[in-house]
Amino acid sequence: MLLLHPRTYNTGNYLNSANFWKTGIAQGILDGAIIFFVPFLCIDHLDANQMTDVGSLGKCVYIALLGSVTLEVALAARYWTYPFGFCVVVSYALVFPFIFMYSAFLQASNVHDPVQVGVGSHIMSNPSFWFIIIVVNLCTTGHRILLYCVIWAYYPRDTQILSEKERLYGAFHEVGWQSINRLLKIGAE
């Protein structure tokens, strides 16, 4: 098995300095710039439904950031289960009712904060907000999705090849019958 799929047992050092600066620092700076400057530069000052106030821009950037981080978690996950998928969707979807509930709570408490009250309904009724959220999430995670698709299609990892072989032929297709019997006796399936 080791000779057929040597990368399965790779002991390479991925925590080197170049990889740290590329994936840890440069990618974070690029994503942060995209998450802030795309909403900032997409806001039209001549639009009738202006989103030029601090509260609108802040909520737009926050929701874009939350979407980008949620998609990154979804991409980084190796195994998806229904509860995990449900939690990923709910963790992003809860921000939308929270904006309305927080605004209603402030109004019920007789606290008038112009940065919070009414901003949620104002930005969510604006098509520019939805366009900004889509563009930011496509820019921050779209290139990673494309890279993962190319790797999965043309350069699969040895673990992916092994799991596909196990799915097609069974877990012990390259093992003799004596070894299979021994493994089954000790509880391997």
Image (cartoon, helix red, strand yellow):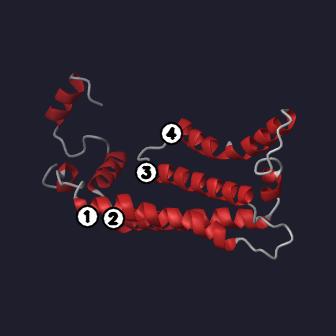
Report which residue position mark 4 lands on.
81
Q: Is label 2 in contact with label 3 (beta carbons under 8 Å)?
A: no
Nearest the eye: 188 or 117: 117
Q: Residue 61, image x and y in percent? A: 63, 58
SS label for mark 4: loop
Residue 24 visible, this angle: yes
Q: Are marks 1 and 2 in contact (CB under 8 Å)?
A: yes
Which numbered disc, 4 or 2, marks the residue closer to the eye?
Answer: 2
N-term mark: 4 or 3: 3
Looking at the picture, tell me which residue is in the foreground, 162 or 64.
64
The residue wearing badge 3 is: 76
Amino acid at circle 4: Thr
Amino acid bearing label 1: Ala
Residue 68 location, quadrant:
bottom right
**Contact? badges 4 and 2 (CB < 8 Å):** no
Q: Position of residue 28 (x, y in %)?
A: 44, 60
Q: Which mark lies nearer to you, 1 or 3?
A: 1
* CA distance separating discs 2 and 3: 17 Å
Residue that mark 2 sits on: 22
Left or right position of 87 against 60: left
> Residue type at mark 3?
Ala
Could you say which quadrant of the image residue 93 lies in? Answer: top right
Q: Secondary structure at mark 1?
A: helix
Disc 1 from disc 4: Cα separation: 34 Å
Query: In this figure, which residue is indicated by the disc labeled 1?
Result: 18
Residue at the image position 59 percent from the left and 51 percent from the top:
66
Mark 1, mark 4: which one is toward the viewer?
1
- Mark 1 or 3 closer to N-term? 1
Query: As shown in the figure, which amino acid type bears the numbered disc 2?
Result: Lys
